[in-house]
Amino acid sequence: MMAELHAVFSSLEHPASMLTPLPEDHPRVVVLRAEGRAFCGGVDIKAAEAGVGGRAWDYKDMRSQQLLSRLIEKMRQVPQPIIAAVQGAAAGGGFALALASDVRVASRDARFSAAFVRLGLTGTDMGTSYFLWRAAGLGIASELLLTGRQLGAERAHQLGLVSELVESPGELEAAARKLAGEMLACSRVGLQLTKEQLNAVSDGGSLRAALTAENSHQMLLVNDPTASAAAMAWLRQLMGGKKGGGGGGSSSGGGAPRSKL
């Protein structure tokens, strides 16, 4: 699965400058979800020792460790927003995949844990020390990573780690696609630059640096024909909704562009 995820996220990378037009069918938003009872239970040590594809995957080797960490870097580098749809366990590396996503939606049976410290390892791995305290605060990150405790879906939602809760795993795809649809109504470059800027400020940049980058991005988009067309389509849809519904919000129709998920 790690090899497949690497291949997928490599294929999603922008081939040139972000302002270079991409084919219309190039994915603009990613929904990361799983089949079965769990989102991801992390590395299967027994399977690793038995060998995968006739060749053992040595989890004690630095190259294997870097295979894991490089995937997290790829997830942050791709221009597409990533929505993690989590059911059941998101443990160890599975928790890391969820944290490396931009937004998380979960069913009420979801549970998150990083029990590395209980295995005699450091409690942090695959970016958990970077993402968790930014998402839920240093105190919560310390509690979970220093104890290996499990975090339930309800508390994860209260902490802001999860954006939306649904009752059952069967409702996850619809919730994730609704969120993705709202992103797809925005301009392609606007989405990309927004993710890039959020990445930049999460690295601890100053307010002035953030404002400077935001100003540059806005000027790029104001002068980009595709982004301007998307903005005008959204405004027409908004104004059409107000006219048709007596000021009751945007209409369900309109010309806002859509692309493949």
Image (tube, rainbow, N blue to C red):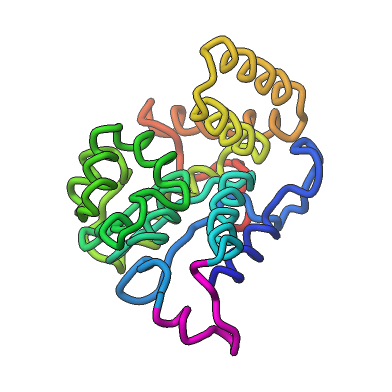
Q: Nearer the viewer, residue 66 or 137?
A: 66
Residue 19 lies in magenta, yes or no?
no
Residue 239 visible in the current orientation: no
Q: Position of residue 232 (x, y in %)?
A: 64, 29
- Image point (36%, 66%), residue name: 39
Residue 53 lies in magenta, yes or no?
yes
Q: Position of residue 65 (x, y in %)?
A: 53, 60
Q: Quadrant of residue 90?
A: bottom left
Residue 203 visible in the current orientation: yes
Query: Viewed as shown, does residue 134 lie left or right of 89?
Result: right
Query: Viewed as shown, does residue 256 lie left or right of 204?
Result: right
Q: Vertically, is 4 above or below 142?
A: below
- Image point (42%, 45%), residue name: 103
Q: Vertically, is 45 above or below 107?
A: below
Q: Quadrant of residue 41?
A: bottom left
Query: Viewed as shown, does residue 239 lie left or right of 78?
Result: left
The boundaries of the magenta stretch are 46-60
Q: Nearer the viewer, residue 252 or 29?
A: 29
Q: Nearer the viewer, residue 83 or 92?
A: 92
- Image point (51%, 45%), residue name: 253
Q: Position of residue 160 (x, y in %)?
A: 29, 38
Quadrant housing the C terminus: bottom right
Q: Nearer the viewer, residue 85 or 127?
A: 127
State the residue lying farthest toward the top. Answer: 208
Query: Viewed as shown, does residue 229 lie left or right of 88?
Result: right
- Image point (36%, 41%), residue name: 132
Q: Main secondary structure of the magenta part?
A: loop
Q: Vertically, is 63 above or below 51?
A: above
Q: Position of residue 152 (x, y in %)?
A: 19, 54
